Image (spheres, rainbow, N blue to C red):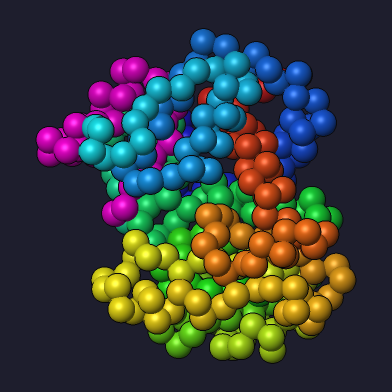
Amino acid sequence: MRHLMSPLDFSVEELEKLMETAGDIESNPQKYAHVCDGKKLATLFYEPSTRTRLSHEAAMLNLGGSVLGFSSADSSSAAKGESVADTIRTISCYADICAMRHPKEGAALVASQNATIPVINAGDGGHQHPTQTLADLLTIHSLKGRLGNMTIGLCGDLKFGRTVHSLIHALVRYPHVRFVLISPEELRVPSYIRTDVLDQQNIEYEEVVRLEDALPSLDILYMTRVQKERFFNEEDYVRMKDFYILDSKKMELAPKDMYVLHPLPRVNEIAVEVDNDPRAAYFKQAQYGVYIRMALIMTLLNIEV
Protein backbone atom coordinates (compact mmCIF):
# COMPACT_ATOMS: atom_id res chain seq x y z
CA MET A 1 0.00 0.00 0.00
CA ARG A 2 1.34 3.43 -0.99
CA HIS A 3 0.52 6.93 0.18
CA LEU A 4 1.34 10.35 -1.31
CA MET A 5 2.78 12.67 1.34
CA SER A 6 5.33 14.51 -0.80
CA PRO A 7 6.05 14.80 -4.53
CA LEU A 8 9.30 12.94 -3.76
CA ASP A 9 7.31 9.80 -2.93
CA PHE A 10 7.31 9.11 -6.68
CA SER A 11 10.50 8.69 -8.70
CA VAL A 12 11.03 10.76 -11.84
CA GLU A 13 10.20 7.64 -13.89
CA GLU A 14 6.97 7.09 -11.93
CA LEU A 15 6.01 10.74 -12.41
CA GLU A 16 6.53 10.34 -16.15
CA LYS A 17 4.22 7.31 -16.16
CA LEU A 18 1.64 9.25 -14.12
CA MET A 19 1.77 12.14 -16.62
CA GLU A 20 1.48 9.71 -19.53
CA THR A 21 -1.66 8.23 -17.97
CA ALA A 22 -3.06 11.73 -17.36
CA GLY A 23 -2.43 12.59 -21.01
CA ASP A 24 -4.25 9.46 -22.12
CA ILE A 25 -7.16 10.29 -19.78
CA GLU A 26 -7.42 13.73 -21.44
CA SER A 27 -7.51 12.14 -24.91
CA ASN A 28 -9.71 9.13 -24.07
CA PRO A 29 -11.94 9.91 -21.07
CA GLN A 30 -14.44 7.16 -21.89
CA LYS A 31 -11.73 4.52 -21.59
CA TYR A 32 -11.48 5.36 -17.87
CA ALA A 33 -15.15 6.03 -17.08
CA HIS A 34 -15.73 2.83 -15.08
CA VAL A 35 -12.32 1.75 -13.78
CA CYS A 36 -13.24 2.67 -10.18
CA ASP A 37 -16.78 1.29 -10.18
CA GLY A 38 -17.62 0.32 -6.58
CA LYS A 39 -14.65 2.24 -5.09
CA LYS A 40 -15.09 5.09 -2.61
CA LEU A 41 -12.92 8.17 -1.99
CA ALA A 42 -13.16 9.88 1.41
CA THR A 43 -12.32 13.61 1.41
CA LEU A 44 -11.32 14.78 4.90
CA PHE A 45 -10.94 18.55 4.63
CA TYR A 46 -10.22 20.28 7.93
CA GLU A 47 -9.53 23.53 6.02
CA PRO A 48 -11.60 25.39 3.40
CA SER A 49 -10.95 24.36 -0.19
CA THR A 50 -12.60 24.66 -3.57
CA ARG A 51 -10.28 23.28 -6.24
CA THR A 52 -8.40 20.65 -4.26
CA ARG A 53 -11.48 19.05 -2.71
CA LEU A 54 -13.71 19.28 -5.77
CA SER A 55 -11.01 18.16 -8.20
CA HIS A 56 -10.35 15.04 -6.09
CA GLU A 57 -14.09 14.40 -6.04
CA ALA A 58 -14.42 15.06 -9.79
CA ALA A 59 -11.46 12.74 -10.43
CA MET A 60 -13.09 9.85 -8.54
CA LEU A 61 -16.52 10.46 -10.10
CA ASN A 62 -14.94 10.58 -13.59
CA LEU A 63 -13.44 7.14 -12.86
CA GLY A 64 -16.86 5.75 -11.93
CA GLY A 65 -16.29 5.75 -8.16
CA SER A 66 -18.18 7.55 -5.43
CA VAL A 67 -17.26 10.12 -2.78
CA LEU A 68 -17.98 10.74 0.89
CA GLY A 69 -16.44 13.09 3.44
CA PHE A 70 -16.59 16.46 5.15
CA SER A 71 -15.51 19.93 4.07
CA SER A 72 -14.65 21.56 7.40
CA ALA A 73 -13.38 20.52 10.83
CA ASP A 74 -16.55 22.00 12.37
CA SER A 75 -18.70 19.42 10.62
CA SER A 76 -16.56 16.48 11.73
CA SER A 77 -15.84 14.79 15.07
CA ALA A 78 -12.66 16.88 15.25
CA ALA A 79 -14.98 19.51 16.76
CA LYS A 80 -15.53 17.05 19.61
CA GLY A 81 -11.80 16.49 20.04
CA GLU A 82 -11.31 13.31 18.01
CA SER A 83 -7.70 12.72 16.95
CA VAL A 84 -6.58 12.41 13.32
CA ALA A 85 -5.39 8.86 14.09
CA ASP A 86 -8.82 7.77 15.33
CA THR A 87 -10.61 9.51 12.45
CA ILE A 88 -8.53 7.76 9.80
CA ARG A 89 -8.89 4.36 11.48
CA THR A 90 -12.65 4.81 11.27
CA ILE A 91 -12.64 6.17 7.69
CA SER A 92 -10.56 3.16 6.63
CA CYS A 93 -13.66 1.06 7.40
CA TYR A 94 -15.80 3.16 5.03
CA ALA A 95 -13.64 4.03 2.01
CA ASP A 96 -10.96 2.60 -0.28
CA ILE A 97 -8.78 5.73 -0.46
CA CYS A 98 -8.62 9.08 1.33
CA ALA A 99 -7.59 12.65 0.50
CA MET A 100 -6.85 14.82 3.55
CA ARG A 101 -6.23 18.53 4.02
CA HIS A 102 -5.23 19.78 7.45
CA PRO A 103 -3.89 23.08 8.86
CA LYS A 104 -1.16 21.30 10.88
CA GLU A 105 2.09 20.20 9.27
CA GLY A 106 2.51 16.44 9.50
CA ALA A 107 -1.19 15.63 10.04
CA ALA A 108 -1.40 13.68 6.76
CA LEU A 109 1.69 11.69 7.76
CA VAL A 110 0.03 10.74 11.06
CA ALA A 111 -3.02 9.66 9.08
CA SER A 112 -0.94 7.51 6.72
CA GLN A 113 0.70 5.78 9.69
CA ASN A 114 -2.69 4.79 11.10
CA ALA A 115 -4.65 4.07 7.92
CA THR A 116 -5.35 0.76 6.25
CA ILE A 117 -6.15 2.57 2.97
CA PRO A 118 -3.96 4.85 0.78
CA VAL A 119 -3.83 8.46 2.02
CA ILE A 120 -3.27 11.47 -0.25
CA ASN A 121 -1.87 14.59 1.38
CA ALA A 122 -4.10 17.36 -0.03
CA GLY A 123 -2.14 20.06 1.84
CA ASP A 124 -0.77 20.17 5.38
CA GLY A 125 -0.32 23.67 6.81
CA GLY A 126 2.52 25.57 5.14
CA HIS A 127 4.44 22.36 4.48
CA GLN A 128 3.55 20.38 1.33
CA HIS A 129 0.85 20.21 -1.33
CA PRO A 130 1.94 17.29 -3.52
CA THR A 131 -1.16 16.87 -5.72
CA GLN A 132 -0.99 20.55 -6.69
CA THR A 133 2.65 19.93 -7.59
CA LEU A 134 1.65 17.00 -9.80
CA ALA A 135 -0.85 19.31 -11.55
CA ASP A 136 1.88 21.96 -11.91
CA LEU A 137 4.35 19.48 -13.41
CA LEU A 138 1.77 18.18 -15.87
CA THR A 139 0.86 21.75 -16.88
CA ILE A 140 4.47 22.80 -17.43
CA HIS A 141 5.26 19.62 -19.34
CA SER A 142 2.16 19.97 -21.55
CA LEU A 143 2.84 23.64 -22.33
CA LYS A 144 6.63 23.57 -22.72
CA GLY A 145 7.21 19.94 -23.71
CA ARG A 146 9.83 19.48 -20.99
CA LEU A 147 10.53 19.85 -17.28
CA GLY A 148 14.27 20.58 -17.46
CA ASN A 149 16.31 23.34 -19.08
CA MET A 150 14.20 26.27 -17.97
CA THR A 151 14.00 29.28 -15.67
CA ILE A 152 11.08 29.32 -13.24
CA GLY A 153 10.02 32.49 -11.46
CA LEU A 154 8.22 31.93 -8.14
CA CYS A 155 6.47 35.10 -7.00
CA GLY A 156 4.64 36.23 -3.87
CA ASP A 157 4.35 34.35 -0.60
CA LEU A 158 7.38 32.06 -0.72
CA LYS A 159 7.54 31.73 3.06
CA PHE A 160 4.16 30.12 3.79
CA GLY A 161 3.31 28.93 0.26
CA ARG A 162 3.22 25.13 0.46
CA THR A 163 2.66 24.91 -3.31
CA VAL A 164 5.99 26.70 -3.83
CA HIS A 165 7.85 24.46 -1.37
CA SER A 166 6.52 21.29 -3.03
CA LEU A 167 7.26 22.56 -6.54
CA ILE A 168 10.88 23.41 -5.68
CA HIS A 169 11.38 19.93 -4.17
CA ALA A 170 9.98 18.34 -7.34
CA LEU A 171 11.74 20.45 -9.98
CA VAL A 172 15.28 20.19 -8.58
CA ARG A 173 15.31 16.58 -9.82
CA TYR A 174 15.28 17.76 -13.44
CA PRO A 175 18.41 18.99 -15.27
CA HIS A 176 19.33 22.67 -15.64
CA VAL A 177 16.39 24.16 -13.76
CA ARG A 178 17.06 27.69 -12.51
CA PHE A 179 14.85 29.57 -10.04
CA VAL A 180 14.18 33.28 -9.64
CA LEU A 181 12.63 33.78 -6.19
CA ILE A 182 10.55 36.97 -6.25
CA SER A 183 9.29 38.15 -2.88
CA PRO A 184 9.48 40.91 -0.29
CA GLU A 185 12.11 40.37 2.41
CA GLU A 186 9.45 39.24 4.92
CA LEU A 187 8.10 36.48 2.66
CA ARG A 188 11.34 34.97 1.36
CA VAL A 189 11.60 31.22 0.89
CA PRO A 190 12.42 29.52 4.24
CA SER A 191 16.09 29.02 5.01
CA TYR A 192 15.72 25.22 5.14
CA ILE A 193 14.54 25.20 1.49
CA ARG A 194 17.41 27.47 0.52
CA THR A 195 20.05 25.49 2.44
CA ASP A 196 18.83 21.89 2.38
CA VAL A 197 17.36 21.82 -1.12
CA LEU A 198 18.80 24.54 -3.38
CA ASP A 199 22.30 25.04 -1.95
CA GLN A 200 22.88 21.38 -1.16
CA GLN A 201 22.07 20.33 -4.72
CA ASN A 202 23.92 23.25 -6.33
CA ILE A 203 20.76 24.57 -7.94
CA GLU A 204 21.16 27.98 -9.55
CA TYR A 205 18.83 30.61 -8.08
CA GLU A 206 18.58 34.30 -7.35
CA GLU A 207 16.36 36.27 -5.01
CA VAL A 208 14.84 39.52 -6.23
CA VAL A 209 12.23 41.91 -4.90
CA ARG A 210 10.96 43.50 -8.14
CA LEU A 211 8.82 41.33 -10.45
CA GLU A 212 9.68 43.61 -13.39
CA ASP A 213 13.39 42.71 -13.04
CA ALA A 214 12.68 38.99 -13.30
CA LEU A 215 10.08 38.80 -16.10
CA PRO A 216 12.31 39.08 -19.20
CA SER A 217 14.30 35.93 -18.35
CA LEU A 218 11.47 33.54 -17.40
CA ASP A 219 10.03 30.44 -19.09
CA ILE A 220 7.37 30.03 -16.38
CA LEU A 221 6.03 32.56 -13.89
CA TYR A 222 4.34 30.90 -10.90
CA MET A 223 2.28 33.50 -9.05
CA THR A 224 0.95 32.94 -5.52
CA ARG A 225 -1.37 34.89 -3.28
CA VAL A 226 -0.35 36.30 0.09
CA GLN A 227 -2.23 33.94 2.40
CA LYS A 228 -4.24 35.77 5.01
CA GLU A 229 -4.82 32.57 6.99
CA ARG A 230 -1.07 32.07 7.59
CA PHE A 231 -0.49 35.52 9.13
CA PHE A 232 -0.49 36.11 12.85
CA ASN A 233 -1.86 39.64 12.60
CA GLU A 234 -4.02 41.60 10.19
CA GLU A 235 -1.60 44.52 9.98
CA ASP A 236 1.20 42.44 8.43
CA TYR A 237 -1.21 40.88 5.94
CA VAL A 238 -2.62 44.26 4.81
CA ARG A 239 0.91 45.58 4.34
CA MET A 240 1.94 42.59 2.17
CA LYS A 241 -1.20 41.66 0.21
CA ASP A 242 -0.79 44.13 -2.68
CA PHE A 243 2.98 43.83 -2.99
CA TYR A 244 2.73 42.15 -6.41
CA ILE A 245 0.03 42.66 -9.01
CA LEU A 246 0.65 41.16 -12.46
CA ASP A 247 -1.11 43.23 -15.13
CA SER A 248 -1.00 43.62 -18.91
CA LYS A 249 1.70 46.29 -18.72
CA LYS A 250 4.05 43.97 -16.82
CA MET A 251 3.22 41.11 -19.21
CA GLU A 252 4.73 43.21 -22.01
CA LEU A 253 8.13 42.65 -20.33
CA ALA A 254 7.77 38.84 -20.49
CA PRO A 255 8.84 36.55 -23.36
CA LYS A 256 6.17 35.56 -25.87
CA ASP A 257 6.49 31.90 -24.83
CA MET A 258 6.41 32.46 -21.06
CA TYR A 259 3.37 30.96 -19.30
CA VAL A 260 1.73 32.20 -16.11
CA LEU A 261 0.66 29.60 -13.57
CA HIS A 262 -1.18 30.10 -10.27
CA PRO A 263 -2.43 27.41 -7.85
CA LEU A 264 -5.55 29.55 -7.22
CA PRO A 265 -7.53 31.04 -5.59
CA ARG A 266 -6.26 34.42 -6.72
CA VAL A 267 -7.24 37.53 -4.83
CA ASN A 268 -5.79 40.50 -6.72
CA GLU A 269 -2.23 39.40 -7.53
CA ILE A 270 -3.18 38.76 -11.18
CA ALA A 271 -5.34 41.44 -12.80
CA VAL A 272 -8.44 40.05 -14.56
CA GLU A 273 -7.22 41.62 -17.82
CA VAL A 274 -4.37 39.06 -17.92
CA ASP A 275 -6.93 36.23 -18.30
CA ASN A 276 -7.24 37.09 -22.00
CA ASP A 277 -3.49 36.77 -22.59
CA PRO A 278 -2.71 33.45 -24.37
CA ARG A 279 0.12 32.96 -21.86
CA ALA A 280 -2.33 32.80 -18.91
CA ALA A 281 -2.48 29.08 -18.09
CA TYR A 282 -3.93 28.97 -14.57
CA PHE A 283 -7.42 27.76 -15.50
CA LYS A 284 -5.89 25.13 -17.80
CA GLN A 285 -3.76 24.18 -14.78
CA ALA A 286 -6.96 23.55 -12.77
CA GLN A 287 -8.23 21.23 -15.53
CA TYR A 288 -4.94 19.32 -15.60
CA GLY A 289 -5.36 18.92 -11.83
CA VAL A 290 -8.36 16.63 -12.44
CA TYR A 291 -6.50 14.46 -14.99
CA ILE A 292 -3.43 13.98 -12.78
CA ARG A 293 -5.56 13.18 -9.70
CA MET A 294 -7.43 10.58 -11.74
CA ALA A 295 -4.09 9.00 -12.68
CA LEU A 296 -2.95 9.19 -9.04
CA ILE A 297 -6.09 7.53 -7.64
CA MET A 298 -5.71 4.69 -10.15
CA THR A 299 -2.03 4.28 -9.28
CA LEU A 300 -2.58 4.19 -5.51
CA LEU A 301 -5.45 1.69 -5.95
CA ASN A 302 -3.27 -0.45 -8.27
CA ILE A 303 -5.76 -0.13 -11.12
CA GLU A 304 -4.38 -0.53 -14.65
CA VAL A 305 -6.26 0.00 -17.89
State the image coordinates of residue 6 (x, y, percent, origin top left). Answer: 48, 52
Q: Going by the image, does 91 lie left or right of 191?
A: left
Identify the image quadrant of residue 219. Answer: bottom right
Q: Going by the image, does 150 lie left or right of 264?
A: right
Q: Going by the image, does 203 lie left or right of 163?
A: right
Identify the image quadrant of residue 303. Answer: top right
Q: Residue at x 65, y 73 (%)?
A: 246
Instruction: Please count the marks in the image.
Output: 0
Q: Is residue 134 magenta?
A: no
State the image coordinates of residue 227 (x, y, percent, origin top left). Answer: 42, 65
Residue range (magenta): 77-104
Task: Give the farthest residue toward the right.
Answer: 256
From the viewer's side, name the closer residue of 193 and 50. 50
State the image coordinates of residue 36 (x, y, percent, origin top left). Answer: 58, 17
Task: Give the farthest residue toward the front.
Answer: 273
Where the C terminus falls, by quadrant? top right
From the viewer's side, name the closer residue of 290 and 18. 290
Q: Residue at x 77, y 38 (%)?
A: 23
State the image coordinates of residue 15 (x, y, percent, origin top left). Answer: 66, 46
- Is residue 191 among what the camera can see? no
Identify the image quadrant of residue 65. Answer: top right
From the viewer's side, name the closer residue of 268 and 284. 268
Q: Is residue 78 magenta?
A: yes
Where the N terminus falls, by quadrant? top left
- Is residue 209 among what the camera can see? yes
**Up-down: is 268 above or below 240?**
above
Q: Residue at x 53, y 43 (%)?
A: 51
Q: Residue at x 72, y 59 (%)?
A: 275
